[in-house]
Structure formats: structure tokens, C-alpha cells
Image (spheres, grey):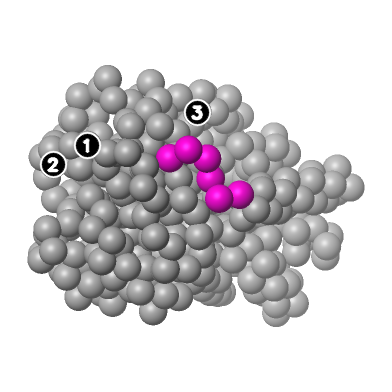
């Protein structure tokens, strides 16, 4: 099992690298311009509404797939999506947004590095008459929309499932994204609150930011395993971090349990071998489609409330659900197979033929 699992992790991480190289080696097709800086001009494509999209890092597997889904939405909705990577830098993200303002794009979408640090430039966009969507983040700007998930509740459920699988005792750790990132901070709080309030015999031995980098997650896990040989599990705020942690654990011959958020297909083999206890389906491509669909509708005149909400789902095998039920925990879940259907059906779920209410979650 160990050799098979190690090979599986290696194959998946190689596949992610290939996806990243493919994405970085292409400028996009048709309706999309991709770059890593803040100076790329908007293209001169006809009269299509232009969406300027500033993401944290286009080399991260989550954002690569997010872009894929967003490009599909741009095609379906007849808009141009201009993707720019902040490469993990708040200052660079601010510069990208300022350039989008100068270019007078129709809507700006931002996956914020820092929920507070971007407020001045977000307000500047609003003053210029450009609607802003802060993706996956609650940002207290004056005019922006927020696309959100039930992050606190979802991460609390991950903590509850993992601690229950550990019979309510032992050592656990958490890999986060970046301090100041709303999603990362909210998920961290949800996890810690449940462990501390409901599982007094479960010890959180480490909470460590990774800058959303699986390689950092691997190095941090190596340190944890050296310092805490009795470590039982690692939770992550986004699934690619789990692959880095798994690689480190396998190299040391350590069997851990994991829980995370995204629900991407790479994690499905680890449900089968029992190491992945629970995942939450947002779906990186589905997230990208949803956000670009919201931006396209706003560009074309739709009116939305300040906060928009995406439905999420807990992923677990039926056998694991029965195991947790025997220990007193029961909740609604979908299987990895069902998750695949939902994660790839975003055009039917969120496409232009659907009402605005499907996008807003109202």
C-alpha cells in the first residue's frame, strides 16, 4: 500500500506541474489574456465587456483550474477575461488593480491577498465607476460585491470529522494559506474553535501558513513529523497543500489522516485508501466559472446583493460516513463520484440560461 500510495502522490504532483507549465506557457485562447504582471494591456476584442481578474498566483494548481473554469464562463457569457497573477505579492496585486482601473475594464475581480490592505484601491475602482467582485473574501469596501462560501462552518465540520475519526484524542496540525487572507483566516478560526471547544483531548500542535504553496506545505510537514512523532492528522485550508503534506509523510513512512477544502479529483484516490477523511466541494473550476459568471452578469446590468453565496457539499465515502456514525457523528454527504459530476457540471448549473438567483445563492 505504501509503494502504491507514494507512486500515486508522485503521479498527481507531476500532473499538477504539467498543468501549471501548460497554463504558464500559453497566453490563453480567444477571449483571455494571461500574464504575471500588472502592465499587460486589455486586448482590442470587439465590443465584448472586459473583466480584469487579479488572482494570488497562477502557478498554484487551484488557480490554474479556476482560470480554466473562468475562461469557460467567459466564452459562454460572451465576455473577455484578462487574468493577471500577483505572484503572492500584495503590492503587485495593488499595481495590477490600478492598471485595470486605468484600462477602464468593465468589472474587476480580485482574489485578495489581504482583505484590509486592498480596501483603498478597491474604493478607488468604485469611485471610477468600475464594479468590483472580491472572490471568496469578505472585504469591507464601499461598493464591492463579495463571493463567499460557508468557510467557518465547513472547516468546523472538517475538524469535527477528523477528531471523531481519531476517537477524540491525539495530535493534529493545520496548514493555512496566508495571514490576512479572509478565506485562510476564516477557515483557520473555524477549525481551531471546534477542536478547542468540542475535543479537549485533541491537541493542535501546529498552525502554519504556506503562502498557498504545496512545496512549503511539504517542508513544514517534514518539520512537524520530526518534532511530533505521534502526529495523527493534518487538515488543510485548500487541497493542494494536502498533496505536499502527503508526500512528506510518505517519505517518512508515516500514515496520517487528512481533511480539506476544494473537492478536486486528485484527492479521490486518497478517499479509497482511507487517508482522506473528508473534503468540501467548492471545485476550483466551478469557483472560477461562478465568479466570472457573476462578473459577466454585472457587466451586462444585473443587480446583485453585496454578498453572493456558493453552495458547497461535504465529500466522504459511504464507508467512512458509517464509521463516523458509529462514533456518534452523522451528517449529509456526497460520494467522490457524485462530487465529480457536480464539479464538472458548472455550465448547466451556473450558465447564462440560469436566473440571477442561481448565481447569488438567494
Decide which of tag 2 and tag 1 comes sooner along the chain.
Answer: 1
| Residue at horizontal 32 percent and vertical 31 percent from the top | 77
- Taking 337 as reference, is 182 left or right? left
| Residue at horizontal 13 percent and vertical 38 percent from the top | 301
Q: Are marks 2 and 1 in contact (CB under 8 Å)?
A: yes
Task: Give the SS element for disc 1.
Answer: helix
The extreme right residue here reads: 3
Determine which of the numbered discs, if any, sits on residue 304 in the image.
2
Q: Are marks 3 and 1 in contact (CB under 8 Å)?
A: no
CA distance separating discs 3 and 1 = 21 Å
**Rendered-image quadrant of the C terminus:** top left
CA distance separating discs 2 and 1 = 9 Å
**Rendered-image quadrant of the N terminus:** top right
Q: Are marks 3 and 2 in contact (CB under 8 Å)?
A: no
The residue pinned by badge 3 equals 344
Rendered location of residue 51, percent (x, y): 31, 49
State the predominant SS element of the stretch in magenta: loop
Decide which of tag 3 and tag 1 comes sooner along the chain.
Answer: 1
| Magenta-highlighted residues | 26-31
Q: Nearer the viewer, residue 17 or 198?
A: 17
The residue pinned by badge 1 equals 297
Amino acid at each position: 500500500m505504501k509503494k502504491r500510495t507514494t507512486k500515486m502522490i508522485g503521479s498527481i504532483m507531476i500532473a499538477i506541474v504539467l498543468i501549471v507549465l501548460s497554463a504558464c506557457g500559453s497566453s490563453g485562447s480567444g477571449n483571455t489574456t494571461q500574464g504575471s504582471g500588472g502592465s499587460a494591456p486589455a486586448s482590442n476584442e470587439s465590443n465584448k465587456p472586459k473583466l480584469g481578474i487579479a488572482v494570488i498566483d497562477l502557478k498554484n494548481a487551484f488557480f490554474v483550474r479556476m482560470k480554466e473554469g473562468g475562461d469557460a464562463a467567459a466564452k459562454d457569457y460572451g465576455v473577455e477575461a484578462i487574468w493577471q497573477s500577483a505572484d503572492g505579492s500584495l503590492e503587485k496585486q495593488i499595481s495590477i488593480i490600478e492598471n485595470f482601473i486605468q484600462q477602464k475594464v468593465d468589472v474587476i475581480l480580485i482574489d485578495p491577498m489581504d482583505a484590509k490592505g486592498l480596501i483603498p484601491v478597491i474604493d478607488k475602482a468604485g469611485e471610477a465607476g468600475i464594479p468590483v467582485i472580491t472572490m471568496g473574501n469578505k472585504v469591507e469596501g464601499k461598493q464591492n460585491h463579495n463571493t463567499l462560501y460557508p468557510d467557518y462552518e465547513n472547516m468546523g465540520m472538517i475538524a469535527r470529522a477528523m477528531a471523531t475519526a481519531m476517537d477524540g484524542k491525539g495530535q493534529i496540525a493545520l496548514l493555512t494559506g496566508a495571514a490576512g487572507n479572509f478565506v485562510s483566516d476564516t477557515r483557520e478560526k473555524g477549525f481551531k474553535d471546534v477542536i478547542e471547544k468540542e475535543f479537549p483531548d485533541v491537541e493542535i500542535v501546529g498552525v502554519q501558513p504556506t503562502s498557498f504553496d504545496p512545496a512549503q506545505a511539504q517542508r513544514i510537514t517534514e518539520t512537524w513529523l520530526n518534532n511530533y512523532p505521534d502526529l495523527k492528522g493534518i487538515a488543510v485550508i485548500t487541497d493542494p497543500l494536502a498533496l505536499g503534506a502527503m508526500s512528506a509523510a510518505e517519505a517518512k513512512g508515516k500514515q496520517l489522516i487528512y481533511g480539506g477544502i476544494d473537492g478536486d479529483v486528485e484527492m479521490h484516490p486518497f478517499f479509497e485508501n482511507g487517508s482522506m477523511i473528508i473534503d468540501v466541494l467548492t471545485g476550483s473550476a466551478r469557483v472560477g466559472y461562478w465568479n466570472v459568471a457573476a462578473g459577466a452578469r454585472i457587466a451586462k446590468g444585473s443587480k446583485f446583493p453585496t454578498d453572493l453565496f456558493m453552495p458547497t457539499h461535504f465529500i466522504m465515502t459511504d464507508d467512512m460516513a458509517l464509521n463516523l456514525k458509529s462514533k456518534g457523528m452523522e451528517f449529509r454527504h456526497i460520494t467522490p463520484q457524485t462530487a465529480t459530476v457536480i464539479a464538472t457540471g458548472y455550465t448547466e448549473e451556473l450558465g447564462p440560461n440560469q436566473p440571477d438567483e442561481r448565481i447569488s445563492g438567494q
